[in-house]
Image: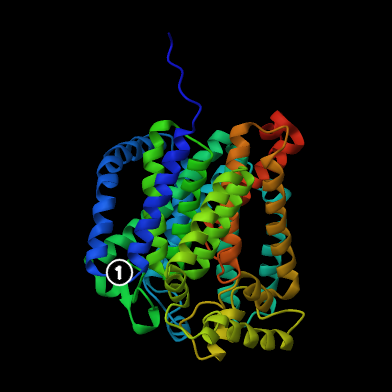
Amino acid sequence: MEFVRPMTKVRSVWQLIAFLVIGLLTFYMMVPFESTTRVLLLILLFPTLVFVLPPAIRSGLRNSLTLFRALTWQHGLWFLLFLSGLVFRLRDVQDINKDPVDAWAIFRMALEMVVAVVLVARLVARRTPWLGVLFQGLLGVLAAYLFVCFFSILWSVKPAWTLFKSGEYTVDLAVLAAILVSVTSTEEYERLLNWTWVLLGIVLGTTWLGAIIDPTDALQGGQELGTLGYELRGIFPVLSSDSVGEFSAILGIVMLSRLVLHRGEESDRAWYRLLLAGSFVTLVISQARSALGGFLFGTVVVLFLSRRFLLTALLGLAGAVVFVFTDSAQYVWNFVLRGQEEQQFQSLSSRADWWQFAWEQFLRHPWTGYGAYAGGRFVVMAGLQMPGTPDVHSSFVETLVDTSVWGLMPLIVVLLAVWFYLLRAVRHSRLSQAESYLAIELTAVLGVLSVRSVLSTNLISHPALPFLAVLGFAELMRRRQKFGDRAFLSIGN
């Protein structure tokens, strides 16, 4: 008699185990347990790591080799954009005014010049007609934002800076246009997405390497950092704790969605669980509260769109029981406060004061702003005597101060449009199940980016690869919903 496998969801059991492991790791880092309790937690985690780690690493290496073999010129340009966006030194306004183009700036500009030359060469040779795509669909809306940025050079408080930064973002969008006109299937575009997540993972790896080599600088401590007493940041390349948290949240959400949706091969599950656990632990140690909020929001998006209502209810019930019958709620609240007074926490770590000052400056030039990428740094932050802070830590406030409502409107429109087409793709009749699952994954990633965009310039700062990657997929889904199987043939026509 043939053995019939029970219908019980074995995968769901593994998902629950993964959640428990991540929870134990998180509480190990967050809660000031006594030494004996810490030892007990490590004993509980050790068997899981022993059995999960080897197959996970094998799966990760296999997937990485498969991806690297499939890389093309498009991925090379994407990598150069990513590399040009890395920061290897910090400069304030005085440094920029004194020496606008230092060695690292030349390095950055050289990489971007290589990308621009390749794009122009392929356009002139008619191998990649990306120029028309740049002004179509969702990319066209974002191009309208860039048009306002370039036009603001006329009144910018720092015209050269506005020109350079606007040019950088234009090259980013042009690369995305070239990719869209070149891909011939959703699977091919998914390789670009996976390449993006790999790049985020690499830079997070350099952050942990820095913590091993130079823990004093990478794990900066202080009484103002609350329960942990330190936060993780990158030292080479330089990466703020908020950026560490955002990259960790994105990578964690991608892995969570693949586990929940059963995407990929069965042998990949261990690798996904390992990355999910590592990403979440990194997120917690970074103490990036907005990124943590984005991760929680993205988790809700994944569970809701995948209709995992029972799993959602069980996790919510388990959390409620833990909070009611233990002191963990107070520990979590202390972690969220991060050593701050509640008044300072409510002011979003003084960001609300920055935005209030930015609003006052905006009212002085309500119809023009101060020039793209210049108003926040050279007017607002310089006026607040914070010349080392590059922007006002908000994509929307920064855009309003820089380009007034003329730049803010297309930015909001394109963000809402991306949300619309991704959500529509989740249940669209013309799309395959794989495309719908990928739409769920990227909608959750967009959730992380949207939450963070309120407190960072992740939508408008070079290279903004996670946002542009999601934007590109939304544009593909818009065309798939409109043209069906002819969508890829219609791009560029």
Name the residue at the top extreme: 1
For this view, does 175 lie left or right of residue 331? right
Q: Which residue is drawn at 50% across and 64% down?
A: 291
Question: 34 or 271, which is in the foreground?
Answer: 34
The x and y percentages for residue 446 are 60, 55
Q: Which residue is drawn at 58% across and 48% down?
A: 303
Count of numbered badges drawn on the protein: 1
Above or below, 212 against 397 in this view is above
Question: 379 or 330, which is in the foreground?
Answer: 330
Above or below, 429 against 387 in this view is above
The x and y percentages for residue 312 are 56, 50
Which quarter shows the N terminus? top left
Amino acid type, label 1:
Phe
The x and y percentages for residue 436 are 63, 38
Q: Name the residue under label 1.
A: 33
Above or below, 216 against 12 in this view is below
The x and y percentages for residue 328 are 43, 68
